[in-house]
Amino acid sequence: MPPKADPVGQDAMILNRPFLRLLVSSAIAAAFSVQAALADPTTLISAAKTELAAGNADAAFSALQAEEARYAGNIEFDYWLGLAANRAGKSGRAMFALERVLAQKPEHAAARLELATTYARLNLGEAARRELDILDGQNPPPAARQQIAQLRHQLGLGDQARRLDKRIAFVTLEGGYDDNVGSYPKDFGLPGLPGPDAIESPYGSLSAGVRQRVDLQSNQRLTLSLNGMVKRNTDDGSDPLGNDDATQFDQDFVGGRAEWSRDLDGQREIAVGADLGYLQLDGEHYYSYLGADAEWREQATAETRVLLTFGLRDMQFENDSYDNLMSRLRGGVRHRLNNAWMLNGDIAVEYEAQKNQRPGGDAVRAILSGSASWLFLPNQRLTGDLSYARTEYSTEYGAPFNDTRTDDRIVVGVQWDKTIRRLWQVKARAQYRDQDSTLPTYTFDQTSGSVSLTRYF
Amino acid sequence: MNAKRLFHVSLPVLLLWLVSLPVHAAVEAGQILFARGAVSIVDASEAARGGSTGSVFYEGDRVVTGSNSIVQLRLSDGALTALRSNSDYQIQRQRFDEAADVYEQAGRLLSGWMRSVTGAIGARYPGNVSQGTSVATIGIRGTAYQIIHVPEEGLPEFPNLLPGTYVYLEEGQVEVSNQAGSRIVSPGQVVRSARAECGPGTCS
């Protein structure tokens, strides 16, 4: 039997001195070259710059972030990582990298400006201003000054939005045209008696309001609002078309509301409110109301908010026979589909309890409504809305109708609005209403269009 | 040196290394990404070692900063945590093993200021990430947030802040809770938990 090969001898052959020397020196050389390559992120940064220039911020950020553990602390690397993170929308990550730059090189103006931008994006206005103040003290070049000014302007707008969220007032001037100012019926439903001619009229209105939020505690607030409107129809009946006088439907309205709300856990909220209003037509009291409601609001998901409201409203008409107590139960969903689209849907049931033997008696109403808003530009929005309501009255109308009354009403509207510098809003709206009824005298249709300009304070 | 001698020399070294293994059996939680000023890592037996860029820390370790200091920690799942001066933060649990489907992360701010950006654990299982203080637990559903915990004796860094835990959310969503209740925090909001028996955002 031949002797077995000596493994030790084999090893010794492999590990003989020239070979070992070669192996060790190669390993050391390789280690040095790898270390040298790793210690210098220049190539990586150049590649990231190329990606950034091509608009591929995500790719630049991914490439740099993959090496963050290795190069963190290298000023150039951290600056470009912060910049790429910002461009890729990773503001949280950007802050870490940029703060590393400034911890080592406080005079790095570009990093400080980038950090200020990051803070502004994250709503850290005070921190952003602090960085801009430091930059101002470093005598920045004109281009940087311009960027600083722009950022300060943005921060100012943010402050303004927060202030307006707390207290806001508005004045709206509106002009429009209504082809059936008095909601006159299409037909009286009486043989031999033709339906009335609808009154068409241009109109103008001026409305104003103010809303004040008072923070009672960190999770409780009181919101007070007051608004009023004056609407004037311009056709006084003296036009050659022979229209009736539209000014009999001139409106004056004033209303107010107080609401207390409590945020239960950041996701659910309860609110209790009271409101009142007064409307007069052509200078005479038409109705007034006093109401109270309670609402449950829940942020079901990040995109969806759910509302459930119960309310009571005591309606007092100039003609006492129409007085009623209205109770209302409403469920609503507000869903943000994405940054551009917002969908709203409501379902409500109302019950009007008569007080003084009004025609038709009590009434129950079911309402379905929805709207979709499309923010097609950052400051412009198109909204379409549609609602359907069915109202059934409990008692038969007397002669000459001798029938119970059921109304079906559809309202459809399209609206465009544009906000200018957050303080101005231009709005245009077209709307069509159509009501069908078992009693012809309550059928009508109405088309209106308006343009308005609102100034917020 | 022939192979036999090399073997004889290597064996005791190997054995010594194996014997020493239990000492380092603690789960590696991450490493210090960046440090300036006085930073130390304190283990469960209260033994402190210096913390500098590249230092490894383990599950259960605390990272403590002195005055005029800043440290950034990179956890094994890529999450980042920054601490400012006079902060004391414990990495209570950090288990990240994609192959074994293990995703757990918990920290505790004993004192001071921290900012965190979640990593792979937060992205995949946000419910498995939490931060705590003596008065509140913060369940992380978002990506970037700040926590300041001011102990009863106050914090020199924040002389105007009342004791308690302050959570400021920059991006995403977090839930702050304690024995008295819980609250979802939305971006831009600050919620203070004054005491453990007082629901977040409800006591002054």
Image (cartoon, rainbow, N blue to C red):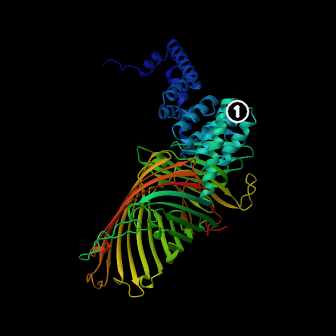
Q: Nearer the viewer, residue A415 or B51?
A: A415
State the residue at coordinates (58%, 54%): A455
Count the marks: how many?
1
A32 vs A400: above or below:
above
**Who is closer to the viewer here, A102 or B112?**
A102
User: Considering depth in this image, is A73 or A283 the residue closer to the camera?
Assistant: A283
Q: Residue furthest left?
A: A191
* Residue A54 seen in the figure: yes
**Location of residue A264 (image quadrant):** bottom right
Which of these two is toward me, A89 or A222?
A: A222
Question: What amino acid is at disc 1?
Answer: Lys
The residue furthest top is A18
Residue that mark 1 sits on:
A105
Seen in the picture, residue B41 relative to B159 is either above or below; the reply is above
Quadrant hosting residue A152 = top right
Residue B70 in the image: above or below residue A254: above
- Percent x, y for residue B128? 48, 54
Question: Circle 1 — which element?
Answer: loop
Q: Residue A72, position in %: x, y?
A: 60, 34
Residue B87 appears left or right of A66: right
Q: Is residue A77 left or right of residue A287?
A: right
Position of residue A37 measured from the top left corner of the image (x, y, whole percent): 56, 22
| Quarter of the image that includes the C terminus of chain A | bottom right
The image shows residue A147 at horizontal and vertical percentages of 64, 35
Q: Chain of mark 1?
A: A
> Which class describes the residues within 10 Å of circle 1: few (<14), some (14-19), or many (20+)?
few
In which quadrant is the N terminus of chain A drawn?
top left
Whether residue B34 appears in this view of the structure is no
- Residue at 50% from the left image edge and 69% from the top image edge: A251
